Amino acid sequence: MILPRGVRPMLATAGALPPDDPAWAYEVKWDGVRVLASVQEGRLRLASRVGNDVTGGYPELAALGAAVERPVLLDGEVVALTATGVPDFGLLQSRMHVRSPSAALRASTPVTFVVFDLLHVGGTSLLDQTYDDRRGCLEALALAGPHWQVAPAFLGEGAALAEVTRAQGMEGVVAKRRDSPYLPGRRSGCWVKAKHVHRTSAVVVGWKPGEGGRSGRLGSLLLGVSGPDGLVFAGHVGTGFSGAVLALLGERLAPLRRDDPAVPDVPREHARHAVWVEPRLVVDVEYTQWTRDGRLRHPSYKGLRDDLDPGEVVRE
């Protein structure tokens, strides 16, 4: 059997956590990189959310191929865990952009593949089956290894999970309808993500030169998100950067320069001295709120997202 290629992950809708209800299963929102993992004839292939092959970036997961006897297509998240077992996206940044990590990097920042769905097994597609049916088949695989595990699910106990994850400093909870099928590439109300912190992805549309200690380097990023008629300006972020991050962003943005902004109606104070770029890079930021005019308030840079398609980045 040949497993399907090009399947895109099902996406959750941001919203309030559904009240405790046995019709819902509640899972931890893992703060990592979404991947679909295919195992066939003992070989593992990892595809990012946009379909890129990222297998080489996580060699410690290769042994999963030999641990599964039948062809499978798994959905999950690659995470880097702290000493207390909490996923840390900042920690994962040192692995996300490296395609052939050294032994030293693998030792200092190991990754774990947290599996939460099963889309195909053997010669059978499970896409049309319910969450409960897919979950039963996933648990029957008994996946447990040094670098992979099945995500726990809690039936009808969302409030307790939200309290625990908040106390542990985790990102949030995802609620999933137990009678829902898997909808590849679609954002569905059958999956609801409730975050403890305000975090969003945004597209880099330009940057402004730094001043003082950042003179001669990037000072802030100008951001956009997709609206009904294309990209719209979402403000700027100038905090949360290390020296290494500033150097990386400078390298990635240099070949993307363009003469005019890819977003309309950029306020004069942001347009002054701006260097415009093609909207191809996506970053994550934390923020306090959205302002009435659609700007991010007090954003802080959290990481570069090579795994996201700029065209799919919307305001959350």
Image: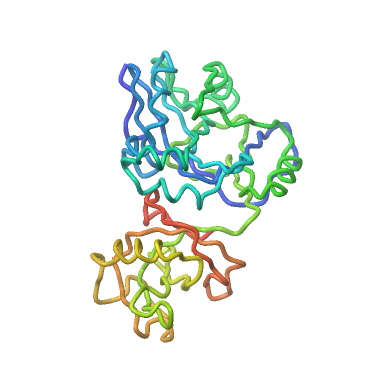
Front-most of 194 and 67?
A: 67
Tell me which corner region of the image, top left, top right, bottom left or bottom right, holds residue 131.
top right
Front-most of 221 and 111?
A: 111
Residue 2 % position (x, y): 30, 20
Tell me which corner region of the image, top left, top right, bottom left or bottom right, holds residue 61.
top left
Left/right of residue 3 with respect to residue 13 in the rendered view: left
Residue 86 % position (x, y): 61, 43
Residue 247 % position (x, y): 35, 65
Which residue is found at the position 43% from the left and 73% from the top? 220
Residue lying farthest to the top in this orientation: 69
Residue lying farthest to the front in this orientation: 104
The reply to whether residue 265 is in sight is no
Q: Is residue 147 above or below residue 189?
A: above
Q: Is residue 272 above or below residue 46?
A: below
Which residue is found at the position 40% from the left and 50% from the top? 308
Front-most of 82 and 35?
A: 82
Q: Count up the numbered dots.
A: 0
The quarter in which the N terminus is drawn is: top left
Residue 265 % position (x, y): 40, 79
Which residue is found at the position 24% from the left and 76% from the top? 259
The reply to whether residue 4 is in sight is yes
Tell me which corner region of the image, top left, top right, bottom left or bottom right, holds residue 70.
top left
Q: Is residue 109 above or below residue 126?
A: below
The quarter in which the C terminus is drawn is: bottom right
